[in-house]
Image: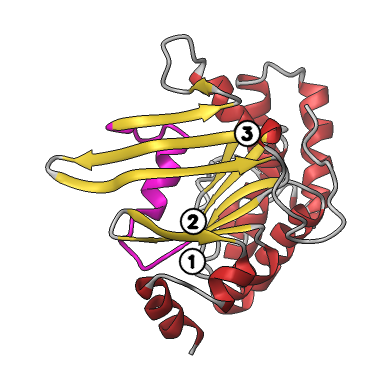
Amino acid sequence: MAVHNGRAEFAAGTADAGDTIISVRHLSKKFGTHEVLKDIDFDVHKGDVTTVIGASGSGKSTLLRCINLLETPSSGQVLYHGDDVMGKDMNVPGYRSHVGMVFQSFNLFFNKNVLDNCMVGQIRVLKRPKEQAYEKALKYLGKVGMLPYIKAKPRQLSGGQKQRVAIARALAMDPEVLLFDEPTSALDPEMVGEVLDVMSDLAREGMTMIVVTHEMAFAKQVSSQVVYMSDGVICEQGRPEQIFGNPQNEKTKEFLARFLH
């Protein structure tokens, strides 16, 4: 599977429909009587960096969890290369190996060292031989600057280091798309940059990503499309220069005015 199909620069343009990887169609999610997501529609094309912004409680993280089937949508569809991921023939662990997720709380195995954290999913889910999993783990730990720490346990690492290990673990599964759920929100301010640098490098190399974030500078500089959500609906979506430079929706304008000033 081709993961990196390099783009010359950030926001190099959305591909045509033939390159669509994920389509979200009329997606809704209820918890009891509370409707968290309402009629969500958008597409993710190969090489896109889609950032999802909005106030806390707007449904952003729930949207990611529905895309990765950590939550079951109440209605609507998530299509992966045109196939309904909730279809009865869908291999959910296999799908998740193609659409990886990086969590705000890292979700590392605290009883395993860094190297084992990056090998276990490859061996158990992808059924890779141990030697191949080892080589993949080293490759991506090197990519995120964590090779010196392969024998360390998560408790010995800073928050930024834990998140870089989590990104390496996700990359080692050779995903086609990476989902990031507020990957810097649990970090001290001085550690945010090291994680955003890794993500920016992935964007340059053409990694397809959906990123829920409060980092507006990152969203503005790295996105190919920005989705602004409020109260469970998409209020506005478009290229970053449009959303940040000339927003049309009043809620978008109010949100950005608070965040950017």
Q: Is residue 259 above or below residue 200?
A: below
Whether residue 67 is in magenta: the answer is: yes
Seen as rendered, the residue at the extreme bottom is 261
Disc 2 from disc 1: Cα separation:
6 Å
What residue sits right under mark 2 in the picture? 104
Q: Which mark is residue 21?
A: 3
Q: Secondary structure at mark 2?
A: loop
Q: Please report the bounds of the magenta region as a residue range.
A: 53-74
Three-letter amino acid code at the position of disc 2:
Gln
Q: Secondary structure at mark 3?
A: strand
Three-letter amino acid code at the position of disc 3:
Ile
Disc 1 from disc 3: Cα separation:
27 Å
Seen as rendered, the residue at the extreme top is 89
Disc 2 from disc 3: Cα separation:
24 Å
Q: Does label 2 or label 1 sit earlier along the sequence?
A: 2
| Numbered label tally | 3
Q: Which mark is residue 124?
A: none
- Mark 2 and mark 1 in contact? Answer it, CB < 8 Å: yes
Q: Sort mark 3 into few (<14), some (14-19) or many (20+) by Cα contacts within 10 Å.
A: many
Q: Secondary structure at mark 1?
A: loop
What residue sits right under mark 1 in the picture? 185
Whether residue 251 is in magenta: the answer is: no
**Scheme of image coloration:** secondary structure
Q: Is residue 194 above or below residue 92?
A: below
* Residue 190 image-quadrant placement: bottom right
**x then y, percent, for residue 189:** 56, 78
Q: Is residue 62 above or below residue 240?
A: above
